């Protein structure tokens, strides 16, 4: 089994990123092989400042390493360091039907919101397909909103294989991530950078506490009973606390006599404790940028070696020279 996943460097990772995806990516790294990439090419559809993109990419590497990605078990690399993927994207584009891309929700959603969608967004699913197919991936962790793109990947792989009468591409399967992706943000909506309601994992302690204390709650007086099941503070607390701790706080909610400020403080302390080791690791990695770069370099070399094998098969199938470039 080979696991493949990428994450866009469009800003600092937040609690929704971690509990919705990153934690599960790291759990899957114990399989036979795992390839995890920082999707800087995909990020170009939204990040236009080159300095920002470089910083976001560096932060992504630091955060992933601090949160438990082990380069001895998983291959970590920058997407743009594997040029075979962009060539493979073109080969796939030549067999991609426009009607297939027009149905993709990311493109349709932007059009519906009156936002001009460029060719990068329109062809985004093809680059994603190349990302997956380039490494003979068999298992791809995806959220509910990405299942369609994996289906597109399978469609393109099958179409290419059929047109050129050759089993060039391995068909990947989806590993659907759990519903913990729906982590509430500071306003009660799903945590998302696009909503401006995120709580970043590695915020400085004072800023982190300020974010937690700013979580929106109802106006129930301190002395009255409160419903933990409808409160964002409690829903976030559940992510960090044991069952016994969850039950104890829920009982205090229902008993009355506790204000939301006290619950927010308990949440902040739990979150700080939960990520304490990761925060220490990140501080250490920050002092070793050359080591981080070496991990990405070694990862890219390994990724290119695999991608070249797949690209060579694809080039040969459609009549191009099969000789790969040197890594």
Image (cartoon, rainbow, N blue to C red):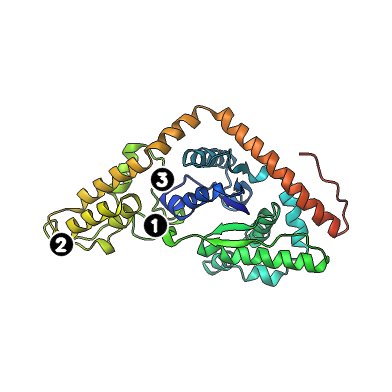
Q: Is residue 278 left or right of residue 71?
A: left
Q: Is residue 325 visible?
A: yes
In this view, 143 is above or below 71: below
Q: CA distance from mark 3 to mark 1?
A: 12 Å
**Position of residue 4 measured from the top left corner of the image (x, y, whole percent):** 61, 52
CB of mark 3 within 8 Å of CB of mark 2?
no
Q: Closer to the observer: label 3 or label 2?
A: 2
In this view, 146 is above or below 325: below
Which tag, 3 or 2, sits closer to the chain's start?
3
Please report the residue visible at 51 percent of the width from the left and 64 percent of the height from the top.
144
Residue closest to the eye, 315 or 168: 168
The quadrant the C terminus occupies is top right
The numbered mark at residue 225 is 2
**Position of residue 87 measured from the top left corner of the image (x, y, whole percent):** 76, 52
Q: CA distance from mark 2 to mark 1?
A: 24 Å
Q: CA distance from mark 3 to mark 2?
A: 31 Å
Mark 1 element type: loop
Which tag, 2 or 1, sits closer to the chain's start?
1
Please report the residue visible at 83 percent of the width from the left and 65 percent of the height from the top.
164
Mark 3 element type: loop
Q: Is residue 116 visible?
A: no
User: Which residue in the structure is indicated by mark 3?
Assistant: 200
The numbered mark at residue 42 is none
CB of mark 3 within 8 Å of CB of mark 1?
no
Q: Is residue 61 left or right of residue 271?
A: right
Please report the residue visible at 22 percent of the width from the left and 63 percent of the height from the top.
227
**Position of residue 82 measured from the top left corner of the image (x, y, whole percent):** 70, 44
Q: Is residue 20 left or right of residue 100?
A: left
User: Which residue in the structure is indicated by mark 1?
Assistant: 183
Which tag, 3 or 1, sits closer to the chain's start?
1
Residue closest to the eye, 65 or 182: 65
Alpha-carbon neighbours of circle 3 within 10 Å: few (<14), some, or many (≥20)? Answer: some
């Amino acid at each position: 089994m080979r696991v493949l996943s990428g994450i866009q460097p469009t800003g600092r990772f937040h609690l929704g990123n971690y509990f919705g995806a990153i934690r599960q990516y790291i759990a899957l790294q114990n399989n036979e092989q795992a390839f995890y990439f920082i999707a800087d090419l995909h990020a170009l559809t939204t990040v236009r400042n080159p300095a920002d993109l470089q910083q976001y990419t560096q932060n992504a590497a630091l955060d992933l390493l601090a949160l438990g990605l082990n380069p001895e078990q998983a291959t970590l690399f920058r997407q743009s360091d594997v040029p075979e993927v962009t060539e493979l994207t073109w080969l796939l584009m030549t067999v991609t039907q426009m009607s297939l891309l027009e149905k993709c929700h990311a493109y349709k959603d932007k059009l519906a919101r009156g936002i001009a969608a460029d060719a990068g967004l329109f062809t985004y699913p093809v680059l994603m397909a190349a990302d997956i197919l380039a490494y003979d991936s068999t298992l791809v962790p995806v959220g509910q909103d990405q299942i369609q793109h994996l289906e597109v990947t399978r469609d393109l792989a099958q179409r290419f294989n059929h047109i050129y009468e050759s089993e060039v591409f391995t068909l990947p399967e989806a590993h659907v991530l759990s519903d913990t992706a729906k982590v509430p943000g500071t306003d009660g909506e799903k945590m998302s950078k696009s909503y401006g309601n995120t709580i970043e994992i590695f915020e400085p302690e004072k800023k982190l506490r300020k974010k937690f204390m700013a979580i929106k709650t109802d106006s129930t007086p301190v002395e009255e009973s409160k419903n933990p099941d409808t409160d964002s503070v409690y829903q976030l607390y559940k992510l960090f606390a044991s069952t016994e701790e969850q039950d104890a706080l829920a009982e205090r909610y229902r008993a009355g006599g506790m204000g939301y400020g006290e619950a927010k403080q308990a949440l902040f302390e739990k979150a700080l404790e939960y990520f304490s080791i990761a925060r220490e690791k990140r501080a250490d990695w920050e002092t070793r940028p050359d080591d981080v770069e070496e991990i990405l370099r070694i990862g890219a070399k390994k990724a290119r070696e695999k991608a070249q094998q797949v690209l060579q098969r694809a080039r040969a199938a459609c009549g191009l020279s099969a000789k790969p470039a040197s890594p």
